[in-house]
Amino acid sequence: MSQASQRHPHDPHLNLTVLRLLAAIDELGGVGAAARALGMTQPSASRSLASLERHLGYALLERTPRGSTLTRNGLAVVGQARAVLGAQERLERTVDALASSGPARLELAASRTIGEHLVPSWLGEQATSHPDTWVSFRFDNSANVARLVLDGTVPLGFVEDPTPLDLGAPHPQQGIVSETLCTDDLRLVVPPGHPWVGATVGPRQLSGARLIEREPGSGTRATLDAAVPQRQRPLTELDSNAAIVAAVAAGVGPTVLSGLAVDRLLADGQVVRVAWDGPALSRPLRAIWLEGTRASREVRDFLTIARRQCALRAQSLQG
Protein backbone atom coordinates (compact mmCIF):
# COMPACT_ATOMS: atom_id res chain seq x y z
CA MET A 1 0.00 0.00 0.00
CA SER A 2 1.41 3.39 -0.97
CA GLN A 3 2.15 5.99 1.70
CA ALA A 4 -0.33 8.43 0.08
CA SER A 5 -3.21 5.99 0.57
CA GLN A 6 -2.54 5.36 4.26
CA ARG A 7 -4.54 7.14 6.93
CA HIS A 8 -2.49 8.03 10.00
CA PRO A 9 -4.07 7.37 13.41
CA HIS A 10 -3.46 11.00 14.37
CA ASP A 11 -5.45 12.39 11.41
CA PRO A 12 -8.89 12.69 13.10
CA HIS A 13 -7.38 14.34 16.18
CA LEU A 14 -4.66 16.64 14.82
CA ASN A 15 -7.07 18.52 12.58
CA LEU A 16 -6.69 22.16 11.54
CA THR A 17 -9.28 23.38 14.05
CA VAL A 18 -7.46 21.96 17.06
CA LEU A 19 -4.09 23.13 15.71
CA ARG A 20 -5.45 26.65 15.38
CA LEU A 21 -6.82 26.36 18.91
CA LEU A 22 -3.44 25.36 20.34
CA ALA A 23 -1.72 28.23 18.53
CA ALA A 24 -4.33 30.69 19.83
CA ILE A 25 -3.92 29.43 23.42
CA ASP A 26 -0.17 29.99 23.17
CA GLU A 27 -0.74 33.51 21.84
CA LEU A 28 -3.66 34.62 24.03
CA GLY A 29 -2.89 32.77 27.24
CA GLY A 30 -6.07 30.82 27.88
CA VAL A 31 -8.69 28.50 26.46
CA GLY A 32 -11.54 31.00 26.81
CA ALA A 33 -9.75 33.78 24.95
CA ALA A 34 -8.55 31.37 22.27
CA ALA A 35 -12.05 29.98 21.76
CA ARG A 36 -13.51 33.49 21.39
CA ALA A 37 -10.82 34.41 18.86
CA LEU A 38 -11.74 31.38 16.74
CA GLY A 39 -15.52 31.75 17.07
CA MET A 40 -15.85 28.61 19.23
CA THR A 41 -17.59 28.09 22.54
CA GLN A 42 -15.29 27.38 25.47
CA PRO A 43 -16.94 23.98 26.23
CA SER A 44 -16.43 22.89 22.61
CA ALA A 45 -12.79 23.98 22.70
CA SER A 46 -12.20 22.16 26.00
CA ARG A 47 -13.75 18.96 24.65
CA SER A 48 -11.55 19.05 21.54
CA LEU A 49 -8.42 19.52 23.63
CA ALA A 50 -9.37 16.79 26.10
CA SER A 51 -10.03 14.37 23.23
CA LEU A 52 -6.62 15.13 21.72
CA GLU A 53 -4.87 14.67 25.08
CA ARG A 54 -6.58 11.30 25.60
CA HIS A 55 -5.48 10.20 22.14
CA LEU A 56 -1.88 11.35 22.60
CA GLY A 57 -1.58 10.02 26.15
CA TYR A 58 -0.05 13.16 27.65
CA ALA A 59 -1.16 16.62 28.75
CA LEU A 60 -0.89 19.60 26.42
CA LEU A 61 -2.27 22.08 28.95
CA GLU A 62 -1.54 22.83 32.56
CA ARG A 63 -4.90 23.77 34.08
CA THR A 64 -4.97 26.05 37.15
CA PRO A 65 -7.70 28.17 38.81
CA ARG A 66 -6.17 31.20 37.05
CA GLY A 67 -6.36 29.66 33.58
CA SER A 68 -4.52 27.28 31.28
CA THR A 69 -1.03 27.35 29.84
CA LEU A 70 0.75 24.98 27.48
CA THR A 71 2.96 22.28 28.97
CA ARG A 72 6.43 21.56 27.58
CA ASN A 73 4.87 18.92 25.34
CA GLY A 74 2.17 21.38 24.34
CA LEU A 75 4.76 23.97 23.33
CA ALA A 76 6.57 21.37 21.22
CA VAL A 77 3.34 20.44 19.46
CA VAL A 78 2.28 24.04 18.85
CA GLY A 79 5.65 24.86 17.31
CA GLN A 80 5.06 22.26 14.63
CA ALA A 81 1.36 23.21 14.41
CA ARG A 82 2.32 26.72 13.30
CA ALA A 83 4.41 25.28 10.46
CA VAL A 84 1.44 23.15 9.32
CA LEU A 85 -0.97 26.09 9.55
CA GLY A 86 1.40 28.31 7.58
CA ALA A 87 1.72 25.72 4.83
CA GLN A 88 -2.05 25.21 4.72
CA GLU A 89 -2.63 28.96 4.42
CA ARG A 90 -0.11 29.22 1.57
CA LEU A 91 -1.84 26.32 -0.20
CA GLU A 92 -5.25 28.00 0.11
CA ARG A 93 -3.89 31.27 -1.22
CA THR A 94 -2.32 29.53 -4.18
CA VAL A 95 -5.59 27.80 -5.00
CA ASP A 96 -7.54 31.05 -4.64
CA ALA A 97 -5.02 32.98 -6.75
CA LEU A 98 -5.29 30.46 -9.59
CA ALA A 99 -9.06 31.01 -9.68
CA SER A 100 -8.82 34.79 -9.49
CA SER A 101 -8.24 37.22 -12.33
CA GLY A 102 -6.69 39.90 -10.13
CA PRO A 103 -6.17 41.12 -6.56
CA ALA A 104 -8.96 40.20 -4.14
CA ARG A 105 -11.38 43.03 -3.31
CA LEU A 106 -13.44 43.02 -0.14
CA GLU A 107 -16.18 45.52 0.69
CA LEU A 108 -17.48 45.44 4.27
CA ALA A 109 -19.58 47.64 6.57
CA ALA A 110 -19.36 48.68 10.22
CA SER A 111 -21.22 50.86 12.65
CA ARG A 112 -19.58 54.20 13.25
CA THR A 113 -18.30 53.40 16.74
CA ILE A 114 -16.64 50.19 15.57
CA GLY A 115 -15.52 51.88 12.36
CA GLU A 116 -13.87 54.82 14.10
CA HIS A 117 -12.19 52.95 16.94
CA LEU A 118 -11.62 49.28 16.03
CA VAL A 119 -11.56 48.94 12.24
CA PRO A 120 -8.32 50.95 11.76
CA SER A 121 -6.29 48.45 13.79
CA TRP A 122 -8.02 45.55 12.02
CA LEU A 123 -7.04 47.07 8.69
CA GLY A 124 -3.47 47.48 9.93
CA GLU A 125 -3.18 43.78 10.65
CA GLN A 126 -4.96 43.00 7.38
CA ALA A 127 -2.42 45.06 5.41
CA THR A 128 0.46 43.23 7.09
CA SER A 129 -0.83 39.68 6.93
CA HIS A 130 -2.82 39.84 3.66
CA PRO A 131 -1.29 42.61 1.54
CA ASP A 132 -2.81 41.28 -1.68
CA THR A 133 -6.39 41.84 -0.47
CA TRP A 134 -7.91 45.29 -1.01
CA VAL A 135 -10.47 46.14 1.71
CA SER A 136 -12.92 49.03 1.88
CA PHE A 137 -15.51 49.86 4.52
CA ARG A 138 -18.83 51.65 4.62
CA PHE A 139 -19.52 53.29 7.98
CA ASP A 140 -23.15 53.79 8.99
CA ASN A 141 -25.37 53.20 12.00
CA SER A 142 -26.06 49.63 13.09
CA ALA A 143 -29.52 49.37 11.54
CA ASN A 144 -28.25 50.45 8.12
CA VAL A 145 -25.25 48.10 8.33
CA ALA A 146 -27.66 45.23 8.99
CA ARG A 147 -29.68 46.25 5.94
CA LEU A 148 -26.54 46.25 3.78
CA VAL A 149 -25.85 42.69 4.88
CA LEU A 150 -29.46 41.60 4.45
CA ASP A 151 -29.72 42.88 0.88
CA GLY A 152 -26.37 41.34 -0.09
CA THR A 153 -24.52 44.62 -0.63
CA VAL A 154 -21.72 43.50 1.73
CA PRO A 155 -20.88 39.94 2.87
CA LEU A 156 -19.91 40.91 6.42
CA GLY A 157 -20.89 43.69 8.80
CA PHE A 158 -20.02 44.77 12.33
CA VAL A 159 -22.64 46.30 14.65
CA GLU A 160 -23.04 47.17 18.32
CA ASP A 161 -26.82 47.36 18.52
CA PRO A 162 -28.31 45.24 21.35
CA THR A 163 -31.07 44.25 18.87
CA PRO A 164 -29.37 44.62 15.47
CA LEU A 165 -31.55 42.11 13.68
CA ASP A 166 -34.88 43.84 14.31
CA LEU A 167 -35.14 45.71 11.03
CA GLY A 168 -38.91 46.04 11.00
CA ALA A 169 -41.35 44.90 8.31
CA PRO A 170 -41.11 43.08 6.03
CA HIS A 171 -37.92 41.26 7.15
CA PRO A 172 -37.61 41.26 10.96
CA GLN A 173 -34.69 39.05 12.03
CA GLN A 174 -34.86 37.14 8.76
CA GLY A 175 -31.74 35.72 7.20
CA ILE A 176 -29.01 37.26 9.38
CA VAL A 177 -26.57 35.31 11.55
CA SER A 178 -24.69 37.13 14.31
CA GLU A 179 -21.65 36.34 16.43
CA THR A 180 -20.73 38.32 19.53
CA LEU A 181 -17.06 39.30 19.43
CA CYS A 182 -16.87 41.21 22.73
CA THR A 183 -18.79 43.80 24.73
CA ASP A 184 -18.58 47.58 24.93
CA ASP A 185 -19.56 49.72 27.91
CA LEU A 186 -21.14 53.16 27.55
CA ARG A 187 -20.18 56.07 29.80
CA LEU A 188 -22.28 58.90 31.16
CA VAL A 189 -20.06 61.96 30.70
CA VAL A 190 -20.51 65.68 31.32
CA PRO A 191 -18.49 68.88 30.82
CA PRO A 192 -16.16 69.94 33.64
CA GLY A 193 -18.13 72.03 36.13
CA HIS A 194 -21.47 70.36 35.35
CA PRO A 195 -23.76 69.90 38.42
CA TRP A 196 -23.48 66.12 38.09
CA VAL A 197 -19.70 66.09 38.62
CA GLY A 198 -19.08 64.02 41.77
CA ALA A 199 -22.69 62.83 41.95
CA THR A 200 -24.29 59.45 41.26
CA VAL A 201 -27.01 59.61 38.63
CA GLY A 202 -29.79 57.10 38.03
CA PRO A 203 -32.55 56.63 35.46
CA ARG A 204 -34.86 59.19 37.09
CA GLN A 205 -32.34 62.03 36.81
CA LEU A 206 -31.30 60.98 33.33
CA SER A 207 -34.89 60.79 32.10
CA GLY A 208 -35.43 64.39 33.16
CA ALA A 209 -32.29 65.74 31.47
CA ARG A 210 -31.73 66.80 27.89
CA LEU A 211 -28.79 64.97 26.39
CA ILE A 212 -26.62 65.13 23.31
CA GLU A 213 -27.58 61.87 21.61
CA ARG A 214 -26.69 59.67 18.66
CA GLU A 215 -29.30 59.37 15.93
CA PRO A 216 -32.06 56.71 15.94
CA GLY A 217 -30.78 53.48 14.39
CA SER A 218 -27.38 53.69 16.07
CA GLY A 219 -26.35 50.99 18.54
CA THR A 220 -25.51 53.66 21.12
CA ARG A 221 -29.02 55.12 20.90
CA ALA A 222 -30.64 51.68 21.08
CA THR A 223 -28.66 50.81 24.21
CA LEU A 224 -29.70 54.06 25.89
CA ASP A 225 -33.33 53.54 24.81
CA ALA A 226 -33.32 50.09 26.41
CA ALA A 227 -31.87 51.38 29.70
CA VAL A 228 -33.87 54.63 29.97
CA PRO A 229 -36.80 54.46 27.52
CA GLN A 230 -38.56 57.64 28.69
CA ARG A 231 -36.39 60.75 28.24
CA GLN A 232 -36.65 64.41 27.39
CA ARG A 233 -36.21 65.55 23.81
CA PRO A 234 -32.45 65.58 23.04
CA LEU A 235 -30.51 68.81 23.05
CA THR A 236 -29.28 67.70 19.64
CA GLU A 237 -28.79 64.51 17.63
CA LEU A 238 -25.48 63.87 15.88
CA ASP A 239 -24.30 60.94 13.80
CA SER A 240 -20.65 61.38 14.77
CA ASN A 241 -19.05 60.25 18.04
CA ALA A 242 -16.26 62.77 17.57
CA ALA A 243 -18.74 65.62 17.18
CA ILE A 244 -20.61 64.55 20.32
CA VAL A 245 -17.54 64.37 22.57
CA ALA A 246 -16.37 67.73 21.20
CA ALA A 247 -19.76 69.22 22.07
CA VAL A 248 -19.60 67.81 25.60
CA ALA A 249 -16.07 69.17 26.07
CA ALA A 250 -17.31 72.57 24.83
CA GLY A 251 -19.95 72.64 27.58
CA VAL A 252 -23.06 71.93 25.52
CA GLY A 253 -24.35 69.19 27.82
CA PRO A 254 -24.12 65.57 28.96
CA THR A 255 -24.13 62.44 26.83
CA VAL A 256 -24.04 58.66 27.05
CA LEU A 257 -21.42 57.35 24.67
CA SER A 258 -19.10 54.39 24.11
CA GLY A 259 -16.00 54.16 26.22
CA LEU A 260 -14.13 53.66 22.96
CA ALA A 261 -15.11 57.20 22.01
CA VAL A 262 -14.65 59.04 25.30
CA ASP A 263 -11.90 57.33 27.32
CA ARG A 264 -9.07 59.41 25.84
CA LEU A 265 -10.88 62.67 26.68
CA LEU A 266 -11.65 61.34 30.15
CA ALA A 267 -7.94 60.70 30.71
CA ASP A 268 -7.15 64.21 29.49
CA GLY A 269 -9.79 65.76 31.77
CA GLN A 270 -11.67 67.34 28.88
CA VAL A 271 -14.87 65.58 29.98
CA VAL A 272 -15.84 63.98 33.29
CA ARG A 273 -17.38 60.57 33.89
CA VAL A 274 -20.42 60.46 36.17
CA ALA A 275 -21.19 57.42 38.33
CA TRP A 276 -24.21 55.56 36.96
CA ASP A 277 -26.75 53.80 39.21
CA GLY A 278 -29.06 52.05 36.80
CA PRO A 279 -29.38 49.24 34.23
CA ALA A 280 -26.15 48.12 32.62
CA LEU A 281 -25.05 50.47 29.84
CA SER A 282 -23.31 47.81 27.78
CA ARG A 283 -23.90 46.15 24.46
CA PRO A 284 -22.37 43.35 22.41
CA LEU A 285 -20.12 44.08 19.47
CA ARG A 286 -21.21 41.64 16.79
CA ALA A 287 -20.22 40.34 13.40
CA ILE A 288 -23.22 39.69 11.14
CA TRP A 289 -23.60 37.90 7.81
CA LEU A 290 -26.34 36.48 5.63
CA GLU A 291 -27.54 33.04 6.60
CA GLY A 292 -26.77 30.28 4.13
CA THR A 293 -23.99 32.09 2.26
CA ARG A 294 -20.53 30.59 1.84
CA ALA A 295 -17.96 33.10 2.99
CA SER A 296 -14.97 33.71 0.74
CA ARG A 297 -11.46 33.14 1.99
CA GLU A 298 -10.98 36.92 2.27
CA VAL A 299 -14.10 37.32 4.42
CA ARG A 300 -13.04 34.45 6.69
CA ASP A 301 -9.56 35.93 7.05
CA PHE A 302 -10.89 39.35 8.02
CA LEU A 303 -13.36 37.87 10.52
CA THR A 304 -10.46 35.94 12.09
CA ILE A 305 -8.56 39.22 12.52
CA ALA A 306 -11.59 40.90 14.13
CA ARG A 307 -12.13 37.94 16.48
CA ARG A 308 -8.48 37.87 17.49
CA GLN A 309 -8.19 41.58 18.18
CA CYS A 310 -11.48 41.65 20.11
CA ALA A 311 -10.27 38.74 22.21
CA LEU A 312 -7.00 40.56 22.92
CA ARG A 313 -8.90 43.73 23.83
CA ALA A 314 -11.21 41.84 26.20
CA GLN A 315 -8.21 40.15 27.77
CA SER A 316 -6.41 43.47 28.32
CA LEU A 317 -9.51 45.01 29.93
CA GLN A 318 -9.84 42.03 32.29
CA GLY A 319 -6.16 42.30 33.17
Image (cartoon, grey):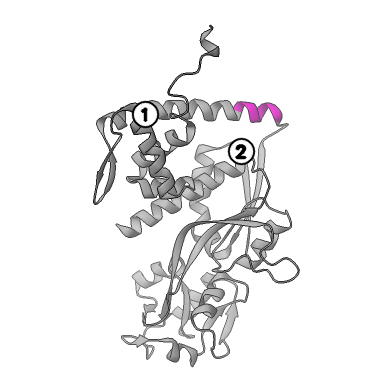
Can see residue 156?
Answer: yes
Q: CA distance from mark 2 to mark 1?
A: 31 Å
Residue 181: x %, y % from top left:
48, 55
Q: Which mark is residue 55?
A: 1
Residue drawn at point x = 68 percent, y = 47 percent: 293
Which type of secondary structure does the marked residue at label 2 adopt?
Answer: helix
Quadrant in the picture for residue 101? top right
Q: The magenta stretch spans which residues?
A: 94-99
Q: Is residue 147 above or below residue 54?
A: below
- Give the residue number, with chain letter if any, for mark 2: 297
Q: Is residue 208 above or below residue 314?
A: below
Task: Check the picture and name the quadrant holding the C terminus.
Answer: bottom left
Q: Nearer the viewer, residue 246 or 261?
A: 261
Q: Is residue 98 magenta?
A: yes
- Mark 1 closeness class: few <14, some 14–19, many ≥20 residues within 10 Å: some
Residue 51: x %, y % from top left:
38, 35
Q: Is residue 102 above or below residue 193?
A: above
- Mark 2 closeness class: few <14, some 14–19, many ≥20 residues within 10 Å: few
Which type of secondary structure does the marked residue at label 1 adopt?
Answer: helix
Q: Which one is closest to the eye, mark 2 or mark 1?
A: 1
Residue 115: x %, y % from top left:
55, 59
Residue type, label 1: His
Quadrant in the picture for residue 110? bottom right
